[in-house]
Amino acid sequence: MDSAVIPLRHGGLSLVQTTDFFYPLVEDPYMMGRIACANVLSDLYAMGITECDNMLMLLSVSQKMNEKDRERVMPLMIRGFRDAAEEGGTSVTGGQTVINPWIIVGGVASVVCQPNEFIMPDGAVPGDVLVLTKPLGTRVAVNAYLWIDQPEKWNKIKLVVTKEEVIEAYQEAMFSMATLNRTAAGLMHKYQAHAATDVTGFGLLGHANNLARQQQNEVAFVIHNLPIIAKMAAISKACGNLFNLLQGTSAETSGGLLVCLPREQAAKFCSEMKNLSSGAGGQGAVGGAWIIGIVEKGDRHARIIDKPRIIEVPPRGSQAANQENSSTSPDPSPNVS
Amino acid sequence: MDSAVIPLRHGGLSLVQTTDFFYPLVEDPYMMGRIACANVLSDLYAMGITECDNMLMLLSVSQKMNEKDRERVMPLMIRGFRDAAEEGGTSVTGGQTVINPWIIVGGVASVVCQPNEFIMPDGAVPGDVLVLTKPLGTRVAVNAYLWIDQPEKWNKIKLVVTKEEVIEAYQEAMFSMATLNRTAAGLMHKYQAHAATDVTGFGLLGHANNLARQQQNEVAFVIHNLPIIAKMAAISKACGNLFNLLQGTSAETSGGLLVCLPREQAAKFCSEMKNLSSGAGGQGAVGGAWIIGIVEKGDRHARIIDKPRIIEVPPRGSQAANQENSSTSPDPSPNVS
């Protein structure tokens, strides 16, 4: 499971808790702080938990930074982390900071819940529909962005993508990683989700497999569609299937929720995500939603069909996104109906 | 405060939570795991909390270790951490591991408490007595041990200490750091402690000052006695007051509790610590107890008197320790009566 669930000594309550920390992967320290916090909270959201009682911050300051850089960078990172925590309805009350060769940022999220506040991720049934709430491809986007300054690497992909497209994709990835999965967590209750997980280091297929393995029923997850940040599939192919993005095992950071929903609820879930994302907070505060597959009878494994449909997700704010808002339209393709 | 205390949405309960992580400081990986766990739990114990509902482990594996060393070292460290958690009545249910230039080990301890389970560290009154439950000098001992192989450093201290004494002191420090402050935490309730903190990175005086600052009453902490691992005071002096051990600001790792007790209870607290430490688990499982000072009226600061009495604490198992068990005798010297 994404979080530890510990029964408490008091009145049927459970402590749900998770921790995560990693190294910076975007240049902007403020956004990096937000991403780290979103990534920690995501493990709670994957269980349908929308509240967080406490957040601790884990930080290491790099010994290789000079004092001026430290003073410029670290307060911004802390600020980003705190702001995202606040958006998650919680606050940072403690933590630990050390000196280390590399910068580390992460946290610990804890919440004490009644049983009805969380959804155990083991109730998928054949006929359910799989929904993903953020596009894939963050790792490819972050790496391609670094390659702009590395001619040897850039030459491999310059025929399929422009620098502007890479920069747009990088920014899309950054905003997507910084988006809290909180709205999706709330809708999991409203639309009676049967199980969910968040997509991070093992990639979509890795986490889908983990989720399939813990189901009570004998089910299999079959993935037909891969929503991917625009152009990242092309980059991956141009590099001989870089990071195995199309095989579903490219690592994501602070990825979306993979949610098993009753068939009759999935379209409503997606449509409400769409409406919310076109409202006040915008997609940046909500995420998107794509129907990506179905739950069949099976041996508790997940697989991606041969030649899955690639859904190119345009960067938010781009013309394509504005015209179509395709990123949040549920897809009623024959694959999943 | 040593831990974050977060009021919960449920029935008067509070979430008490703390995190700590650092780098290895003893050679033995198993003992290092125990020390890291004892150090995390200590923040709960400082609030008189004897239970822990959940522990997460934070770990980084060094990229500079070869695979064989990793496989030898990391499982032992994890085992030590888990064993100490079990001794604390809890278990490790999750965590995060990353790769890093340096090894990091630490954790997050969480407990959901009723109000009577913890003692807010702000109730000291003039006339209280200050008790310390582990000897000082862990940092000096750990460093002196490294100097055995560094002739330049060793020459500075060889006139005041033998190699055998340094090895004994190092081992004493290691066992002391690995000792849980849990027994002391339990006795804080029995003997109505008014406030406590644990002694770690800021040294005895640093933490005493922090504790004094948060008192409701206008009090000052006056420290008369310094219980120190045998010979460490001599080493510190020989090196021109190394780490400011005698000024009370030498960092400790997983140090003892500094407890403010009502005057009439302090001797009983010490005597029960002594009895428990001579029983089954031994001093290794309990710690010791020394009366080190008093609480006066004052401006919420702590100070050490001019020429404090140094209490030489012999290594456990040594002849001196067996003869006298002086390490756990409360000291009814005129200083504190």
Image (cartoon, coloured by chain):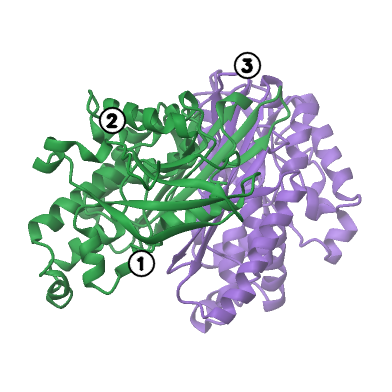
Chain colours: A purple, B green
Are the residues under badges 1 and 2 in a single subunit?
Answer: yes
Q: Position of residue B257 (x, y in %)?
A: 42, 42
Numbered tag placed on residue B274 in the rendering: 2
Q: Is B13 left, or right, of B294 in this rendering?
A: right
> Of helix, strand and loop, which one carries label 1?
helix
Residue kind at label 3, given as amino acid type: Gly
Residue at the disc numbered 3: A12
Q: What distance separates the C-alpha of mark 1 from that of mark 2?
A: 29 Å
Q: Position of residue B64 (x, y in %)?
A: 29, 64
Residue kind at label 1, given as amino acid type: Asn
Which mark is in front, 3 or 1?
A: 1
Residue at the disc numbered 1: B244
Q: What distance separates the C-alpha of mark 3 from that of mark 1?
A: 50 Å
In this view of the protein, which residue sits in the foreground, A90 or B47? B47
Total number of numbered discs in the rendering: 3
Q: Residues within 10 Å of mark 2 (few under 14, many from 20)?
A: many
Q: Are marks 1 and 2 in contact (CB under 8 Å)?
A: no
> Of helix, strand and loop, which one carries label 3?
loop
Nearer-N-terminus badge (1/2): 1
Subunit of mark 1? B
Q: Residues within 10 Å of mark 1 (few under 14, many from 20)?
A: some
> What's the residue at 38%, 52% (across, down)?
B224
Residue kind at label 2, given as amino acid type: Lys
In this view of the protein, which residue sits in the foreground, A332 or B130? B130
Residue B139 to residue B218: above or below: below
Q: Quadrant of the C terminus of chain B?
A: top left
